[in-house]
Image (cartoon, grey):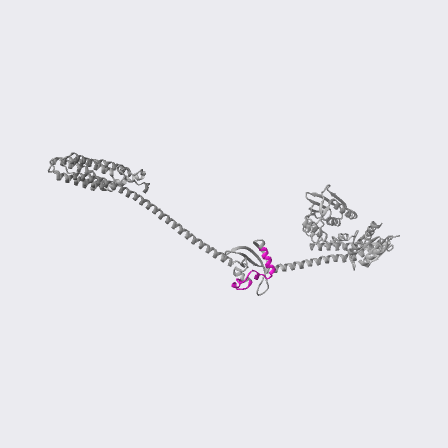
Amino acid sequence: MSKRILIVEDTEDNLQILRDLLTHSGYAILEARDGATGVQAALQHVPDLVLMDIQLPVIDGYEATRRIKSNPATATIPIIAVTSFALAGDEAKTRAAGCDGYVSKPYSPRSVLQLVRQFIG
Amino acid sequence: MRFTLSRASRPRARGKREIFAPAAKPGPALEDELRVAQSVHLVSQLPALVVGNCGGAAVAFVALMHSTDWRLLLAWLGLVWMLCLPMAVNWFRLKDRPAPEQVSRRRIRRARLHSLALGAAWALILVFVAQSEVPIEVRLLVTVAMLVLGLGASIVMAPLPDAALAYMLPVLVSMLLFVASNDQTPLHSHTILNLFVAFASLSFLRQGWLSFRRSLESAGERARLAEARAREVELRHSAESALRISQEEVQSTSATLQTIQRRMQSIVEALPYPVAVFAKDDAHVLYANERSAELLDVPLPRVYELAGPDFFAERAEYEQFLKRLEASDVVSGFEARLKHPHGTDVWTRLSAIVMTYGGESAVLSTIEDVTERKRYELELHAAKEQAEAANRAKSQFLANMSHELRTPLNAVLGYAELMADGVYGALPDSVLSVLGRIQANSRHLLGLINDVLDLSRIEAGQLALAHEPYALSDIVASVRSAAEPLARAKHLEFRTQAQPGMPAGTGDARRLTQVLLNVVGNAIKFTDTGCVEIRACCDGERFVVEVQDTGPGIEQKDQARIFEEFQQVDNTSTRNKGGSGLGLAISHHIIELHGGAFDLESVPGRGSIFRIAWPTQASLEACP
């Protein structure tokens, strides 16, 4: 059974790029378009990996990450922040919230794939 | 002149032996004094002695001349007169001459001998009187005259008792002998009279001597008294003059004090600051200068009706001020609002010191009107807040811009890559080529966005440097791996050279890499043939990196300009070579933030050397 990746992303284009990239590489995709839904989906489906945008409606990626990491049922799921916050200190902030990886936009889909594979093969 | 003789040691005349003796152990000074006084007395009495003796002798001569050999008698008279002659001469000679002690002593000695001689001469008269031819009346007359002479001598010569005795004794002795031996004169009453007169003479002599001594002593005492009085007067005078001087001093001191006080008062009055003195107990105003009244905009007398708390706009500030004053006797620069009766409060800076004023504990306060300054401060504060808010807004704007520009760019680059990777199916070469152009331009756009954002951050002072250890050789290696493919693509020789064993540096490795990449990238971009070389070394406490190329070089006049924003040597080349013209400006700022500097050596047509040097340990101030 293919690995399942939860993409939490509110921008349709970016969501589609990741979906196209990852499905093309053989991963199963779960989607959420805001932070709260993302947390709920993680709890419901317990994916193998989460790609988390930071600027999100309802609750932002930092908060969503904290919730997922604070729930024992989902705490072990690796989370990679995929964000346009690319300024100095932004990576540290995502790490502080509990993210395991960090990719800044604009990213190369190839490098995202590489990182995903590092976490879940 | 000193008198050592006191009243108690005055001679007590008891018995003949003591009578003529000098006073009991008189001091040498008194002895000398006595001699001098005796000498003076002697000289003064000389005329009386001369007259008495000459006259007496003449009377005796007249009385006896008829009953005895007048020639012998005349010879006797001559003898007496001859003896009197030196006395008369001496009187004329010495009457006004001072008699020092030595001279006086000599004179007295001489007078003693002289008296003895004269007394002996008088004793000789008895030879004539004893002759039987002399009638009894004459005898009586002569002896009585002699006794009178002796009596007179005992009175006159009392101060020189030994001389007087020397004068009287021969006469008395011979007379007694004469009376006793001559039974032809059976006048016992006469004998008794003789004895009585002799005794009286001695008694007078003693009395005279004692009174002379006494007068001399009392003269000494008077002199002592006079001296004491003189001393007392002198003392009084000096005390009076001292008193006068000190009174004058007090007067002049108090005048000086008044002058100082007036001066101080005018200084305090002239001070541009309000000055007031408050009583420490109930805080009422003890003193206030005109400025205090001006500050509060009330007449000066009204100020004196106020007390400390009336000045303050806020009771709490007054209490705080008191607390400060209790903690320390000096308070300076206490800011407080004072009540202004006709308008807004006055902002002041109070300085106070505890002092004694007119004997009571008081607080001297100087009040500085800082309303204007306070207003500026508040305005400045507001302006600062505004600027900070603007800066925050700018930061937020930068962050938002960065975010908002990246999001669509991400879609462009992402789709392009997926398409190029065949995610959406195989594409013809012509489409792939166009896709490559889209990707290149998008990356250029991303570079521009990054540069503009960097520059904005630098201008806003918001470019934060990391402060972490790094190895310069690692930076050179990563620059090499990034730049080498570019150089290879242009068929340029590419060399790197890093000094082995360089110490670790502290600073922002990512930014330093960015700087080196920029400079090396430029070198490759502008060099068409030849080589690009990176040389890194450590020179003391500085890293020095040289980037040498064989490019076109930069004219001297353009060398400073290339570090400015949006400048390339030939602006038309921007289109040919690409690049925003921001890279070097940003690199320059980054190196400046590290405390270092750029240096450029260039020969047009031959190439350039960019030399970048910065401290191995970036100072913390440069890394906010």
> Which stretch did the figure color magenta?
B296-325
Rendered view: A3 above or below B212: below
Residue B314 in magenta? yes
Residue B566 appears in the figure: no
Residue B420 x %, y %: 84, 54
Residue B106 x %, y %: 26, 36
Q: Closer to the camera, B577 or A50? A: A50
Residue B284 appears in the figure: yes
Residue B119 x %, y %: 20, 36
Q: Closer to the camera, A81 or A38? A: A38
Rendered view: B27 above or below B550: above
Rendered view: B71 above or below B381: above
In what quadrant of the picture does the N terminus of chain B appear? top left
Q: Please state the total of marks drawn on the protein image.
A: 0
Magenta: predominant secondary structure element?
Answer: helix
Examine the image and state in which quarter residue B439 appears.
bottom right
Q: Closer to the camera, A65 or B428? A: A65
Q: Residue furthest right?
A: A1
Residue B523 in magenta? no
Examine the image and state in which quarter residue A9 appears.
bottom right
Left or right: B541 in relation to B197:
right
Left or right: B71 in relation to B33:
left
Q: Closer to the camera, B214 or B570? A: B214
Residue B74 x %, y %: 13, 36
Q: Residue furthest top?
A: B181
